[in-house]
Amino acid sequence: MLLGYNHNINYKGSVFHIQTEDSGVKNPHIITLLYREGVILCSKKTSYADILKIDNLEAVVEDLMKEQHKDMLRRLKSGEFDDKAFGAPQQQPPKAPPREPEEERSMPAPAPAVPVTAGSSGVDLLFQETVQPQSPNTPPPSKANEAPAKKQEAVSLDDAILNFFGASK
């Protein structure tokens, strides 16, 4: 059984997670799942029971996993899942006339999405913590023995594919 592939991809302002795994020779199939906000948008399962006897099975299964994972990344980028992920485009309600200013209410900012970085593996991105903004008077919680976090920048879907699998395919 081979280790799988995991990617968090920033697409159209949302983070999507793509996971591909091998179930091993006792249950010979590869499964790829596409998630958005914990909801599975698509799954693809491929059996390799018919090739169990070949000599280089592990290398062939690894190639099958990479191709299936890249295919799901391409399908996401092509917009195939946009309706499922974002819903059908909604009509905009007519604009209301401007109102008199009211007291401004302060709402906390939403937590930022975890971007994919050029040097990150999918596994380490799975375990990143989302940090909520603190008010200026509240000291941040201390975490002993923790290395300072590196600033991450989002990369394009094409760059994520090329960085993870290389430009050879």
Image (cartoon, rainbow, N blue to C red):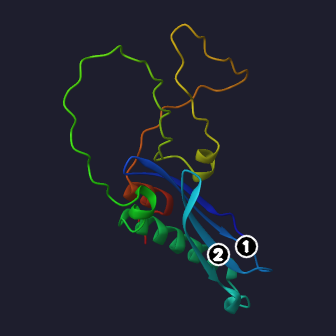
Name the residue rendered at 19%, 31% in the picture. 97
Residue 151 left/right relative to 122? left
Q: Residue furthest right?
A: 26
**Residue 36 x/y as whole percent:** 52, 54
Question: Amino acid under label 1?
Answer: Ser
The disc, 1 or 2, on the residue closer to the chain's N-terminal end is 1
Image mark for residue 23? 1
Which amino acid is tagged 2?
A: Ile
Left or right, residue 120 beside residue 141: left
Could you tell me which secondary element the residue under label 2 belongs to?
strand
Q: Residue at x 21, y 44 (%)?
A: 94
The Cα atoms of the two marked residues, 1 and 2, are separated by: 6 Å
Residue 96 vertical position relative to residue 79 in the rendered view, above or below: above
- Image quadrant in which you'd find residue 107: top left
Query: Is disc 1 in contact with disc 2, using a CB cutoff of under 8 Å?
Result: yes
Which residue is drawn at the image coordinates 48% and 24% (left, top)?
A: 108
The circle drawn on residue 30 is: 2
Q: Residues within 10 Å of mark 2 (few under 14, many from 20)?
A: many
11 or 23: nearer the eye? 11
Q: Helix, strand, or loop for circle 1?
A: loop
Residue 40: image location, x then y, percent: 57, 62
Image location (x, y in percent) of residue 62? 62, 73
- Image quadrant for the N terminus? bottom right
Q: Name the side, left or right, on which 5 lies relative to 161.
A: right
